[in-house]
Image (spheres, grey):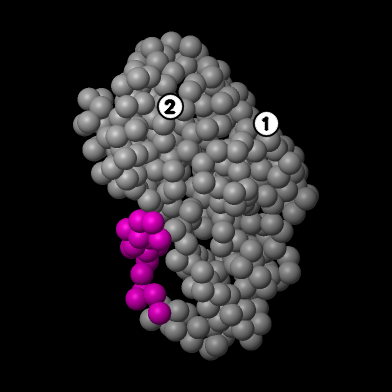
């Protein structure tokens, strides 16, 4: 690593107060309605790191790790796991947004940027989820880095605060099957020598996803209620694909708690629709969910859109855990 890059890392660490991913994630979560504090911050990262990398870090032309595996990056934990399932022993996966952080507000660290400069592929969800991606790619200056937007060309539902549409496609296993096919094809294009491995892994993983899809359909058919009150509009694809109904959303904008009038309206909706539970998310404070649930006389349960930590460290484990939460909240046989 060049002297310039070491200076850049020291300067950035001082500017950020030497926050690790977990501390930084907690800081962003506490910002409430200040949705996009990254404006300007990542400009600084981009300017400093681009100069540093061009000054002699020299890793952009080497997409393999010391173990010989191809280094690839993925934006969020669920996508990172999909890439691991398809790539197997041939890839090392860098997860950009760590478990516990929100992709809506997270900012890459200098170490992540350094490793991204050596990556061969960056897998993104798209639909505006990874606001930092364009600047990060420009900043690292890696000419071999291929950016793969997994949702490209897919049907995008218009709900929630996102101007480009709702980005949470990965929460429907039906749509994830298309993600897996694109991951397979991208890995083959970057590493054709292991095409047979990637095809076999993808086939086996798709079979698991098909079983998950069948299990979800069977469970939903036994739900006593189909009315969902969720923390964010994160579950619209799941709701759409499995025949449920979005009764209400607690926070229309992530990080911005509902007003007193909005709370009263949500409570009224819960009572009118008979929605049996309120679902919080572990990436955000449950305070609003607890207040609304208490007023409406229903329990608070948790749906996790990101996972990444035991017992939800893989995508399939995450979705099976969420299915159990839905069964508890909406009624049905576990």
Residue 156 in sight here: yes
Name the image quarter holding the N terminus: bottom right
- The relative height of residue 8 versus residue 141 in the rendered view (above or below) is below
**Of marks 2 and 1, which one's residue comes earlier in the chain?**
1
* Residue 186 versus residue 223 in the image, above or below: below
306 lies left or right of 331: right
- Residue found at x 53% / y 19%: 243
Q: Determine if the magenta segment contains residue 23.
A: yes
Query: Observer-nearest residue: 62 or 261?
Result: 261
Identify the residue under disc 1: 203
Which of labels 2 and 1 is toward the front? 2
Q: Residue at x 65, y 78 (%)?
A: 58
Q: Which residue is at 53% across, 29% downward?
A: 238
Whether residues under marks 2 and 1 lie with C-beta atoms below 8 angstroms apart, the answer is no
User: For the magenta stretch, what is the residue range?
Assistant: 15-34
**How far across and how far down the image is residue 26, in percent?**
33, 58
Q: In which quarter of the image is residue 48?
A: bottom right
Q: Farthest residue in the front direction?
A: 261
Q: Is mark 1 on a helix, strand or loop?
A: helix
**Mark 1 neighbour density, 10 Å: few (under 14) some (14–19) many (20 or more):** some
Residue 333 figure quarter:
top left
Is residue 110 in view? no
On screen, residue 327 above or below 164: above
Measured Cα–Cα span from mark 2 to mark 1: 37 Å
133 or 212, nearer to the observer: 133
| Residue indicated by mark 2 | 247
Q: Which of 227 and 103 is in front in this view?
A: 227
Q: In which quarter of the image is the C terminus?
A: top left
């Amino acid at each position: 690593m060049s002297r310039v890059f070491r200076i850049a890392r020291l300067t950035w660490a001082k500017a950020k107060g030497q926050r690790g991913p977990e501390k930084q994630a907690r800081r962003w979560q506490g910002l409430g309605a200040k949705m996009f504090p990254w404006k300007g911050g990542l400009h600084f990262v981009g300017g400093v790191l681009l100069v540093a990398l061009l000054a002699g870090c020299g890793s952009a032309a080497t997409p393999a790790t010391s173990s010989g595996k191809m280094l690839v990056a993925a934006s969020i934990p669920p996508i990172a796991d999909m890439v691991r399932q398809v790539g197997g022993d041939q890839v090392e996966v860098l997860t950009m947004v760590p478990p516990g952080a929100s992709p809506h507000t997270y900012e890459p660290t200098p170490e992540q940027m350094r490793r991204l400069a050596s990556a061969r592929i960056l897998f993104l969800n798209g639909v505006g989820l990874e606001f930092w991606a364009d600047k990060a790619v420009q900043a690292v200056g890696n000419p071999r880095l291929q950016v793969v937007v997994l949702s490209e060309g897919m049907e995008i539902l218009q709900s929630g605060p996102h101007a480009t549409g709702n980005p949470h496609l990965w929460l429907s296993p039906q749509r994830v099957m298309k993600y897996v096919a694109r991951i397979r094809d991208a890995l083959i294009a970057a590493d054709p020598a292991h095409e047979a491995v990637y095809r076999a892994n993808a086939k086996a993983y798709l079979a698991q996803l098909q079983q998950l899809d069948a299990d979800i359909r069977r469970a939903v058919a036994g739900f006593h209620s189909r009315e969902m009150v969720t923390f964010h509009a994160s579950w619209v694809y799941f709701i759409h694909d499995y025949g449920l109904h979005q009764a209400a959303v607690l926070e229309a904008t992530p990080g911005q708690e509902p007003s007193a009038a909005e709370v009263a309206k949500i409570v009224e909706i819960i009572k009118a629709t008979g929605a049996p539970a309120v679902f919080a998310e572990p990436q955000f404070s449950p305070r609003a969910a607890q207040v609304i649930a208490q007023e409406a006389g229903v329990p608070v349960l948790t749906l996790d859109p990101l996972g990444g930590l035991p017992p939800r460290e893989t995508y399939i484990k995450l979705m099976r855990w969420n299915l159990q939460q839905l069964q508890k909240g909406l009624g049905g046989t576990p």
